[in-house]
Amino acid sequence: MTTIGIIGSGSIGSAFARTLARAGIAATISNSRGPDSLEDLVGELGPTIKAGTREQAAAADIVLVAVNWAKLPAALKDLPAWNDRIVIDANNAIEAPLFKPIDLNGRASSEVFDGLVPGARVVKAFNHLQAHVLAGDPRGEGGRRVLFYSGDHAGAKVEVGRLIERLGFFGIDLGSLAIGARLVEFPGGPLPVHNLVRFG
């Protein structure tokens, strides 16, 4: 069985955990403050979501990372080798809480992120919807809410696409990181401003 870890318990990390819990999918969630700080959250989410250390979350087969941009290097520092495991980049290059864009000198945020997780298969996903929408009913408005994903590893994208489907969303593959990640970047990309639903 595929294991799932979450590094970051802020708005997006918690929303992702909530969607997993609703679908009955087990995961380990972590943050910089330690498992004890997550007691209330995991108590609310139910038995499928447990609190753990960064190292425990990072040991999963699929690891979603959703951390304030400035804290990413520290959050990913000194973790065990990724060894070709899947890492979902759910981050946006903004300075919280002011939502000030960070100058990446023309690089896509996922290109920068990729350099922080050497040996991982990076897939960009779960970053373009607001947290309350991501945590809400994926079958709202009579259809299925759209989630975009992109990456340079076909097998990793297949796995993330399957997870998106299991969660009740409709996944759309945007292609490579160089193309797809820029489309869903916030700010700057054209897709984060849209909350799309597929009918039929």
Image (tube, rainbow, N blue to C red):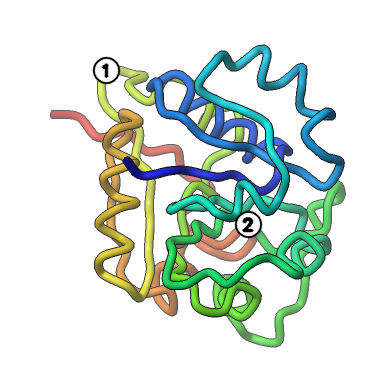
Where residue 74 appears, as percent x and y from the top left, is: 81, 65
Specify whether residue 20 is in view: yes
Q: Compared with residue 158, is residue 103 higher up or lower down, i.e. above or below?
A: below
> For the point 68% across and 31% down, which residue is it?
51
Query: Which residue occupies the foreground of this view, 111 or 140?
Result: 111
Which quadrant would the N terminus be assigned to in this image? top left
Image quarter of residue 108: bottom right
- Where 106 falls versus 20 (above or below)? below
Query: Label 2 belongs to which residue?
Result: 91
As drawn, the label of residue 142 is 1
Above-or-below relation of 182 to 138: below
Q: Please state which amino acid type lies under the numbered disc 1.
A: Gly
Which of the two labelled residues, at mark 2 and mark 1, occupies the earlier sequence position? 2
* Residue 192 visible in the snapshot: no
The residues bearing labels 2 and 1 have C-alpha atoms spaced at a distance of 29 Å
Residue 55 lies, in percent from the top left, at: 68, 53
Q: Is mark 1 on a helix, strand or loop?
A: helix
Viewed as shown, does residue 37 lie left or right of 63?
Answer: right
* Quadrant assignment for the C terminus: top left
Q: Percent position (x, y) of residue 125?
A: 46, 53
